[in-house]
Amino acid sequence: MKRVAALLLVVLLLALVLPGCADNGETGGTETTESEDTIIIGSALCQTGIQAPLDEPALRGAQLAVDELNANGGILGKQVELVAMDGKSDPVTVGNVAKQLIDEGAAAIIAPSDFDFGGPASQAAQDAGIVGLSPCASSPLYGSAALGDKQFTMSMWNTTMGAVTAEYAYNELGYRSVYVITDDFIDYTKSLSRYFIVAFEELGGEVIFEDTYTQGQADVSAQLARIKALDEAPDFIYVSSYMPDLALIIRTLRESGVTVPVMGGDSYDDPALFESLGAEYGSDIYFDTHSFMSDEGSPNYSDWAASYEEKFGEEPDALWIIPGYDAVMVLAQAMEEAGTTDGAEVAKAMEEMTFDLMTGKLDWSDAASGHEPNKAAALVELVEGAPKFLGWKTPENLPEP
C-alpha cells in the first residue's frame, strides 16, 4: 500500500485531464453485448500521428493474435473480432474512440502505449466496467490506483526501466557520473528520468545536471553548450526522449565530438533510430526494453516471426508488434480462466495468473497494490547501428513510484 499511496494523489488531477474521470471507483463487472458467436476486442491504438510508431505495430501484433486464436477455436468457443479505430495521437479522440468501441460491444479495450494517450481509453473502459490493457505504457500512473480496478499495462513500469539501466551503468560498467537530458513533453520521459536518477543516486552515483528538452524543439545547441562547458566529462549521458527527436539529440552529441556512452529506455527500440545513427554514430548506446527480436530473447521467436511473415508478407520490422500480440493473448487466457467476458472476473483472473509470453513472464499485483507489473527488462546495446541482446535484467532495488 505504501507504494500506491503516492499514486492516489494523482487521481484528482486526472479528473481534470482525462475524459470521464469523475467516476474512477470500483465499478462492477459488465457482460458485453457481443453477438452469441463473437467476442469483440476493441483497439483504440493510434494508427496515425506521433504515437503511431509504437501503436501501429502493436495493432499488427494484435491482428496476428486474433487470427491464431480463431484458428484454434477462439475464446470460450466463440470467434474473436478485433475492431480497430484510430486514436489519432490525440487524447480526446482516443477517449471518444474507446467509448464508441464499447458502444459497439467491445469486451475489452486495447489502449495506446503511453499514459497520456492511453489513459483516456482505459478510463472509458473502467467507466464501462471492462478491462483496459495497454501494450507498453510504462508510467506507474498506468494501473489501478489512478485508472481503476480493471486497468492494466503489459509493460514494466518506469521504476523498473530506470533502475535496470542505473544498476547496469553503476554495477557492471563502473560508471559514477551522469548528465541527464529529459524530454519534458510527456509523462513517460519525465517519470523515466526521475526513477533513473533516484536509482542511480541511491547506488552512490552523481547526477551532474538534469537538463531539459521539448519534443519538436529541433535544436540541441543549448544542451550541447552546457555539456561542453563542464570541467570534466560525465561517464555517460542519460537521454530520456523518443523519436523523432531522440535521433537528433544523439546525432548532435556525436557530430559535436561528445563520445561518452548514451543510455535510455524502451523508446530507443526503434528501427528508425538505428537507421538514423547508422554505423558511424550507433555505438556505445544502451537501453532496456520489452523483449528482443530473436530466439535469444524469445525462445519461440522464429516460429512466431514465420507466422507474422505469412500473414503480412514481410518480416517483423518493429519490437512493438510483440506486446500487441501478447496483449490479446493475455485477454484470451484471462477470459478462458474466468469462464466469462465479465470485466470484474477477467480482471480478477489477470491478478491471479502468471503469463508466459513472447515478452517474458508477467504477473500483476492486486488492485489494492496498484496492478504493478512484475516483469524483467531486456537490456540491449547498440553496436554500429545494430542491436545486441545483453540479457534479461531485474533490478535489485526498485524506486518508490
Image (cartoon, grey):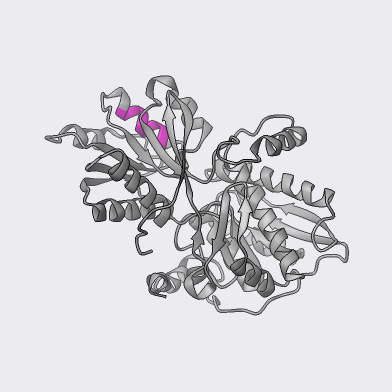
In the displayed image of the protein, which residue is found farthest to the top?
280
Residue 304 belongs to magenta span? no
Q: Is residue 189 visible?
A: no
Kindly report the secondary structure that dominates the magenta region of the rendered protein. Answer: helix
Residue shown at 72%/72% (left/top)?
342
In the displayed image of the protein, which residue is found farthest to the left?
231
Residue 252 belongs to magenta span? yes
* The quarter of the displayed image where residue 343 is located: bottom right
Residue 69 position, x and y percent, is 78, 51
In the displayed image of the protein, which residue is found farthest to the right?
36
Q: Looking at the figure, which quarter contains the C terminus?
A: bottom left
Residue 210 position, x and y percent, is 25, 47
Residue shown at 58%/64% (left/top)?
122
Q: Looking at the figure, which quarter contains the N terminus?
A: bottom left
Q: Is residue 299 visible?
A: yes
Residue 362 lies left or right of residue 274; in this view the side is right
Residue 301 position, x and y percent, is 64, 38
What residue span does the magenta drawing correspond to?
246-253
**Number of numbered labels in the structure image:** 0
Residue 386 lies left or right of residue 345; in this view the side is left
Q: Identify whether 250 is placed above or below 35.
A: above
Residue 251 lies left or right of residue 210; in this view the side is right
Residue 254 position, x and y percent, is 31, 26
Q: Nearer the viewer, residue 397 or 320?
A: 397
* The quarter of the displayed image where residue 195 is located: bottom left
Q: Nearer the viewer, residue 187 or 298?
A: 298
Q: Nearer the viewer, residue 390 or 249?
A: 390
Residue 117 lies left or right of residue 260; in this view the side is right
Residue shown at 39%/49% (left/top)?
164
Q: Identify whether 145 is placed above or below 295.
A: below
Q: Identify whether 110 is placed above or below 365.
A: above
